[in-house]
Image (cartoon, rainbow, N blue to C red):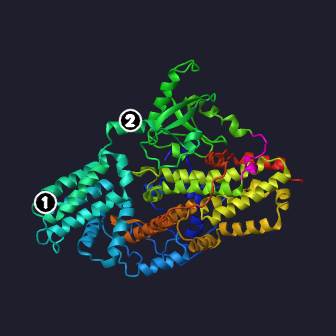
Amino acid sequence: MPAGMKPLEKFLKKQTTALTRAGGFGEKATGTGASRRRASLSRVVPFFRETSPESGPAREVFSPDTEEAPCWPSATADIRSPSLSSDEQSSETSLDTSWTPLPADTPDNLALALLDSVAGKRYGNCTETLLDDFMLTHPIFLTSDRFQQVLLQQFGVEGKAGEGWPSWDGAERKQAVLSVAFRYLDTYRELLQEEGERSNSFPKELYLCAVQELSQFPELVEDVLKLQRWTEILQCPSEEDKEIRKKQVRPLFRHFRRIDACLQPREAFRGSDEIFCRVYTPDHSYVTIRSRLSCRVGEILALVREKLQYSEDQPTQPGNLLLVAVTSAGEKTAFRPSDEAVFTTLGVNTHLFACEPSELESLLPLPEEIHWSPGDSKLHDMSAEEVATQLVVFDWELFSCVHEVEFVCYVFHGEQARWRPLNLELVLQRCSEVQHWVATEILQCQSLPKRVQLLRKFIKIAALCKQQQDLLSFLAVVLGLDNPAVSRLRLTWEGLPGKFRKQFQQFESIADPSRNHKSYRDLMGSLRPPLIPFTPLLLKDLTFLHESCKSFHGELVNFEKMHKVAEMVRSIRRYRSSQLALDTEPSPSHLQTKAYIRQLQVIDNQNLLFEMSCKMEPKDM
């Protein structure tokens, strides 16, 4: 994680302290997942009020120094996923009553147990659950490279008595390996395609092994043909395809603006995607670079240095450069040359600067980030229905781009993950952006009657987002209205009709974190897919599970915990199990509203927002 970035644990600080006092946590989890996080949820949800969850019975926590092997909680123990609503919990329990967890074992042995289960259906109807659990969580305890090696080795096992899987014949063993391999390829298809030759070597090697076995096992012919198709799917793109992709350079969210690009449907970002980005110098001039999304900081600086060498405004040759992120509040984060994929970790109004070490302290935010000018909001000319619809559509596009494994990588591996949670980070950035957008629009409006109108419109937008089951924008708008700089505007709130005040109080109760966000979870339980959840709370729940239960005891994997993690990921899958369909007629100003919503202009400096609020309604009023 880049030096100076706030850790994810800050978001859970109060919760963790309360749980530790209650005996809920033992020693802080060790390893990369616990100590190194990518982006801070406290930045993403700055106004999400904190409270301790309902205290439960203290659970035994095993220390790595304990000599005896751990006794993991049984499958019937009440350690249900906090991401699931009460209705979903009961549904999950009824479906999973016969589920038998794999005993704690080494990663390689768990992979063998999975193959044994698939070959002999040892776990009956639960084999599918076991297979899905393993696929979603194996990056936590078994690298993909090692998993591929195990599959290749087991495909070639001869199966002599007393070795391998002695109760199954050769065909059953090989078909089990291929079934698991196909599930792996299908689950990680998009991510493997991104890696090119590195990932394509696995299906190629497995295909060659299977072809050699066809004469002895002719029943494998269908699987061999399927493997051949997979090698074609994952093969490296042709030179022609590479040239086409090079021309498809996309601006990244806020850091380079192009109206034509923002109107296009959102697609998932991959590490090899090329983007435009502005990198500023200390005098606030900038160069525009074209870079891979996943490239290292050293490569970014090389591109900047090359641009500056040919710049007429640069009187001297650039020396030893640093890449620094500067927020609108003036906070600075210097990146290391080895840091990767830094673009998606930037805050809403955070910009990249290239400077020499001696210039670091003199870096200032861009003038437009620290000065503001009052004016009428464009929202006055837009209908609440059209704005809400565009919020929902854009949120759905962003949420649909997030691969399931990104949630696991974000919490458990941080920057060490094989696959970067690029799209998940953009969803979190969007949540923060919408919150600050609400506060910005209200605080830039000088007219009291118009401010009251904006307040009414935002409450109506929140109601429409809730009605269309977009809880991401719904809660982001509510939390934006709860911003201290907005909530202190007494005259503005007094001008709000009673009906709207009552409605907003109901919305606030849904955002209330008491009893472990019970109101929000009850609302989730009443909804059916498709829906967009409040993603930061999903990550909070996943982090809670990660920190409250150890993944390993020595070399043994706690697979019961892996099952609970997979349950949370499956809840995300259920939310997207059907496509979002909005029956609305686009208005003549449809494109204008769409462009506005996808390129929100916001102030994310809380000190500046509070200063604007005090000038608008001084404390003595």
- Nearest the eye: 5 or 273: 273
Amino acid type, residue under disc 2 in the picture: Glu
Q: Is residue 417 magenta?
A: no
Q: Earlier in the sequence, mark 2 or mark 1?
A: 1
Q: Which residue is mark 2?
A: 243
Residue most extreme to the right: 621
Q: Is residue 76 visible?
A: no
Q: Secondary structure at mark 2?
A: helix
Magenta-drawn segment:
372-382
Q: Is residue 104 above or below residue 90?
A: above
Inter-mark Cα distance, 2 to 1: 39 Å
Q: Is residue 373 magenta?
A: yes
Q: How packed is label 1: few (under 14 Cα within 10 Å), some, or many (20 or more)?
A: few
* Mark sitting on residue 145: none
- Judged by its main secondary structure, the magenta piece is loop
Label total for image: 2
> Quadrant of the rendered structure where residue 484 is?
bottom right
Residue 212 placed where, x, y %? 13, 56
> Quadrant of the rendered structure where residue 116 is?
bottom left
Amino acid type, residue under disc 1 in the picture: Leu
Q: Is residue 383 above or below residue 91?
A: above
